[in-house]
Amino acid sequence: MLSIRDLVKVYPGSTTALAGVSLDVSEGVFGLLGPNGAGKTTLMRVLAGVLEATSGTAELDGVSIVDHPERIRERTGYLPQDFGFLPHLSGERMLRYLLRLKGVRSPQGEKELCRALLDRVHLEDAAKRKVKTYSGGMRQRLGIAQAVAGDPRLIIVDEPTAGLDPEERLRFYRLLSELAQDRIVILSTHIVEDVAVLCPRFVVIRQGRLVADTSPSEARRALEGAIHEGAVDALEFNRFVADPSRRVTQAYLVEGRNRVRIYQTTGDLPPGFRTVAPTLEDAYMILIKTGSLPGSSRAGEGATP
Ligand code: ADP
């Protein structure tokens, strides 16, 4: 169990990146969803023991990150957002280099350990290829191989699916859910689909505060009957979405025509609009704009009108 209490991080120059985050996380894939600048990377780095919090505590199975950062680092695998690869090394050499940096040793020897890790992330056939020839998804899986070395209790992955094509993304999702069978995996992301596919539970972070702690199905249920969709004429579109009385949750094009989804609980719907099943994207947009979902336990926390 990972228990986080009142974590605050103020960077020099007084940017408050975390404004008091409290959370309990158990085994499985746990989602941390939020827009750019919300504080996700800061939280991930504090939990990985590579950045000191200004105040607050976090404990992994009862061991304090504040008092024993070295013990936490031993039990944590971290795949940061900007993972640096040495392009001219083979996958295997790169992994050996990373394991040495991390100080991971294995009774069966470095070579065997590398082989086992490359198998684990399904890169065995690409072990001898140079990293520069790897696809984005293969690089991320190599990053996971180093994160999983030493059999950590907690794995932290920061925005891992950005830039992956749909097939690679699916493969990466499968790998994360495999790894989460018997450990805690925290997935930080701004991509709603990541959470919809992988996370039985997730939190939404906005301006350094958690504004929801829920599941994808619960978040959708909170908006039942309140999401409506319709076509909007191209000439009307800008005025329609800028109208402050409307809560637009999504706007996209279907075969060249504007489709708009809105959140509305009372009054007449715009002409041609009909009530539709809410999606997690709708719930996320409401949370980011208003700071709460109707009837949610954290409703009102950090909310702005
Ligand atoms: P996210 O990962 O959700 O995009 P970050 O944790 O990177 O968010 O950033 C949260 C806030 O902290 C942002 O306002 C960002 O500009 C600021 N920030 C991040 N890193 C630093 C730093 N090293 N020094 C000062 N401010 C920072």
Image: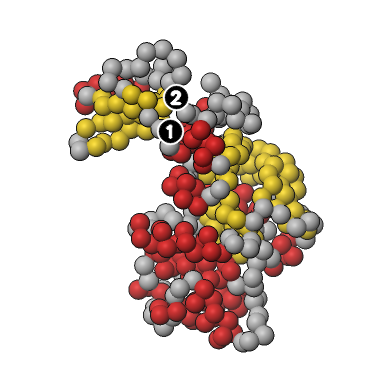
Q: Quadrant of residue 231?
A: top left
Specify the amino acid type for callout 1: Pro
Taking the image as shown, residue 171 lies to the left or right of residue 204, namely: left
- Please tell me how crowded label 1 is: few (under 14), some (14-19), or many (20+) other residues with Cα within 10 Å: many
Taking the image as shown, residue 27 lies to the left or right of residue 80, namely: right
- Please tell me how crowded label 2 is: few (under 14), some (14-19), or many (20+) other residues with Cα within 10 Å: some
Label 1 sits on residue = 278
Specify the amino acid type for callout 2: Ala
Q: Position of residue 90 (x, y in %)?
A: 43, 80
Taking the image as shown, residue 213 lies to the left or right of residue 63, namely: left
Say which residue appears at 66% left-offset and 38% top-offset. 19
Residues 131 and 282: in front is: 282
The colour scheme used here is secondary structure
Farthest residue, direction top: 267
Say which residue appears at 72% left-offset and 41% top-offset. 6
Decide: is 7 above or below 283. Answer: below
Q: Position of residue 265 (x, y in %)?
A: 46, 19
Label 2 sits on residue = 226
Decide: is 264 above or below 148. Answer: above
